[in-house]
Amino acid sequence: MAAIELEGVTKRYGDVTAVSDLHLQVEEGEVFGFLGPNGAGKSTTINMLLDFVRPTSGTVRVLSRDAQAESVAVRRRTGVLPEGYDVYERLSGRKHVEFAMRSKEVDGDVDAVLDRVGILDAADRPAGGYSKGMRQRLVLGMALVGDPDLLILDEPSSGLDPAGAKEMREIVRAEADRGATVFFSSHVLGQVESVCDRVGIMREGDLVAEDSIEGLREAVGGEEQLVVTVDAASEDDLDAVRALDGVSSAATDGGTVTVSCSSDAKTRVIGALEDNGVTVKDFSTQEASLEDLFLTYAEDGEAPDGVDAPDAEVAE
Ligand SMILES: Nc1ncnc2c1ncn2[C@@H]1O[C@H](COP(=O)(O)OP(=O)(O)OP(=O)(O)O)[C@@H](O)[C@H]1O
């Protein structure tokens, strides 16, 4: 069953189209990473899921309910870590969690929540004295109260140090293992890569890609960068390399030849250079990373071959 369903959702603010004809479905129990650069439409989409913002057109369903007509019921079963949430400066971390439990009308072990997010030691200090990362941990703790069916996390890793970001990922995974659906936004693929079942990439209001991490990896997996250190290489030598099967590009600065090719073409590349009289001193390979792929989508909207691009018409 779908935990989130957006059908043809558009949101305009005056002349600005923040989200354009978005179709998106996230299944129950899925960890979905919602990615895109600043201004892509991520927060607007999240705000429509929670009925903080109303779509200009289209329908939004969350936990099988209408996001507008049944927003109270949706929010009761949803834990939210909003972007830029302000803590109550004078209230302790403990009071914040107690407040979250009261507003969700649930009982729970406050210490266990604070311990889970790593701030039990600071439980009785006013949250105004918390660091940015501690505030983020506190708000995550508040979102986890009552074992929600859906967790919506807007830039959850912001303000967290690497250890904190890792703990965040572990909590996300544990929540999904318990059966919760997790929908979270980020503008950095690296932070979500290891926890997501699937990602959607937004750019200027359009969903430009939607795939599993595995699918994205396959799309970039075929190509590698081969960097060959040589005595000298000419354009003729490069032409011999470019003519080989599996080679998509080759370039040189004189002392190094850089070739984009399939992994089975590497030995042919070395052979062709040597056949042309080039002395090969050394070589190394680099796999194209998912981060490179993400940047390709995020910056120019070009979908590499083989990636499921749901919306062919990418706004420039
Ligand atoms: N209340 C508003 N009034 C006018 N324009 C808005 C409003 N909220 C968002 N926008 C515009 O909608 C577009 C999408 O913004 P949104 O905040 O959804 O992006 P985002 O992907 O969450 O970005 P970020 O990563 O910076 O948080 C932007 O052009 C933004 O300026």
Image (tube, grey):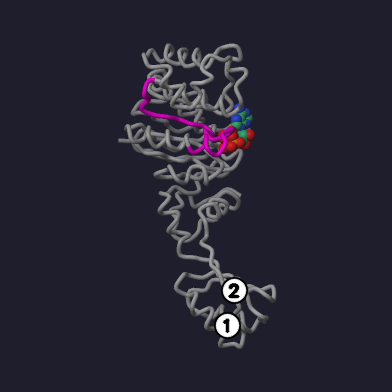
How far is the residue under mark 1 from the one under mark 2? 10 Å
Q: Quadrant of ligand 1?
A: top right
Name the residue at 51% across, 21% down.
121
Relative horizontal placement of residue 188, taking residue 105 as reference (left or right): right
The label on residue 273 is 1
Q: Quadrant of residue 150?
A: top left
The label on residue 178 is none
Badge 1, how many Cα within 10 Å: few under 14, some, many 20+?
many
Q: Are marks 1 and 2 in contact (CB under 8 Å)?
A: yes
What type is the residue that disc 2 sits on?
Answer: Val
200 to 44, vertically: above or below: below
For label 2, being within 8 Å of ligand 1 is answered no
Return the residue found at the far left.
1
What span is in magenta? 146-166
107 to 277, vertically: above or below: above
Give the mark nearest the N terminus, 1 or 2.
2
Any part of residue 69 in sight: no
Q: What kind of element bears circle 1?
A: helix
The label on residue 228 is 2
**Image location (x, y in percent) of residue 3:** 36, 33
The N terminus is located in which quarter? top left
103 to 42, vertically: above or below: above
Any part of residue 141 in sight: yes
Badge 2, how many Cα within 10 Å: few under 14, some, many 20+?
many
**Image location (x, y in percent) of residue 5:** 39, 35
Pick the front one: 11 or 181 = 181
Check if residue 46 falls in the magenta segment: no
Relative horizontal placement of residue 135, taking residue 112 as reference (left or right): right
Q: Quadrant of residue 72?
A: top left
Q: What kind of element bears circle 2?
A: strand
What type is the residue that disc 1 sits on?
Answer: Leu
